[in-house]
Image: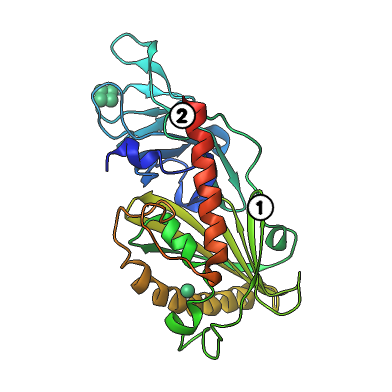
Amino acid sequence: MTETEQASQYPPGWWIVALSREVHSQKPLGIKRFGKNLVFWRSEGNKVHALDDLCPHRSVKLSLGRVRDNCLECPFHGFRFSPDGNCALIPETGKPAPGIAVPSYAVEERDGYIWLWWPGSNGQTGRVGEPALFEEVTAQTMSWWDDAVDQGCHATRAIENQLDTAHLAFVHATTIGRGSNPKERKRVVAKEMEIKIELGNVPEAIPYIRLCLPNYWINVIHPRFMATIAFAPVDEGRVRLYMRTYQRFIVFPIIGRLITWVLNVVNRVILNQDTRVVESHPVGTAFAGLEMKEQLVGSDLAIREFRKWWANELQKASSKEE
Ligand code: FES
Ligand SMILES: [Fe+2]
């Protein structure tokens, strides 16, 4: 699948694409997201910017360059690009070059994440609104632990897996799925930008899962213990899961961190059980699995809602394009 075909698979929106700490102040970060090579860098005041990681002069990676005078300088011939992607200086003339530019993206930094406004395949959708944070974790005093795990599947497959409660009794039979009854149907509530799954018997109570569309997920296990995952799409066959484990049983700095680390190790074991299965999805068959004639059943309600949202957003984006 070409880069453009891949890029067209992701609905416009605010996506978590990296951790703040991955973008250093002097060293640009080159990563692949949405099937494209992107470069993230910081200008004065630590502000993060994102550009296509491709110099418009002679096509090398800008991420190999350096930050100079609030610009990103190409490693090859020193052209400088400002945060909006315009060429601010060509060394040969000592002047800006108005006709030369690199595509740029709106980015925000919140809660230790880098959020990127993905504009759709042809950059047709300008930013709308702000990144949506989970009040469950932002409004509270918590200690937390960050981790990242790569899975060899499309982002939609990894997201669907975390909306799938029927797999617990099988994939996680030795851990969280022990004693889980596949006949027990969970309540699913879908709103405009959210899919919620109530895991207990009491409506609107803990425990529950919420997916804040497109790619931010929380599992509120207990009022003092929760886990989040942000699913950053790398390309059609890879996704990076930024997992964070929060707790507020003990928030004393060192002991609190130690507890989140232990909880994170447990979460990682559980996630590894998923990885084996999700990596067996055939690559290229998913943007929300719509291309495959999969036979969904009653317990797939949350997945059905996710696919419906995804298809609808892509449809809206493509009608804007026309
Ligand atoms: S390739 Fe970037 S300045 Fe020449
Ligand atoms: Fe799982």
In the image shown, does 217 or 6 lie closer to the viewer? 6
Residue 85 image position (x, y, % from top left):
44, 24
Label 1: element kind? loop
Q: Does mark 1's beta carbon lie closer than 8 Å to ligand 2? A: no
Where does the image place residue 112, in percent across and percent down from the top left?
57, 53
Q: Which residue is mark 2?
A: 123
Residue situated in front as seen by the camera: 218 or 195: 195
95 to 58, vertically: above or below: above
Quadrant of the frame with the N terminus: top left
Q: Residue at x 44, y 54 (%)?
A: 288
Amino acid carrying mark 2 in the image: Gly
Between label 2 and label 1, give the one nearer the viewer.
2
Residue 15, x across and y down, in percent? 53, 46
Residue neighbourhood size for the residue with mark 2, other residues' Cα within 10 Å, grouped as few (<14), some (14–19), many (≥20)? some
Foreground: 169 or 96?
169
Q: Is residue 66 above or below residue 16?
A: above
Residue 301 placement: quadrant: bottom right
Residue in the image at 48% along x and 56% along y:
231
- For label 1, the residue is 133
Q: Residue at x 33, y 64 (%)?
A: 281
Q: Is residue 217 above or below residue 80?
A: below
Q: Badges 2 and 1: C-beta atoms under 8 Å apart?
A: no
Q: Earlier in the sequence, mark 2 or mark 1?
A: 2
Q: Is residue 44 left or right of residue 111?
A: left
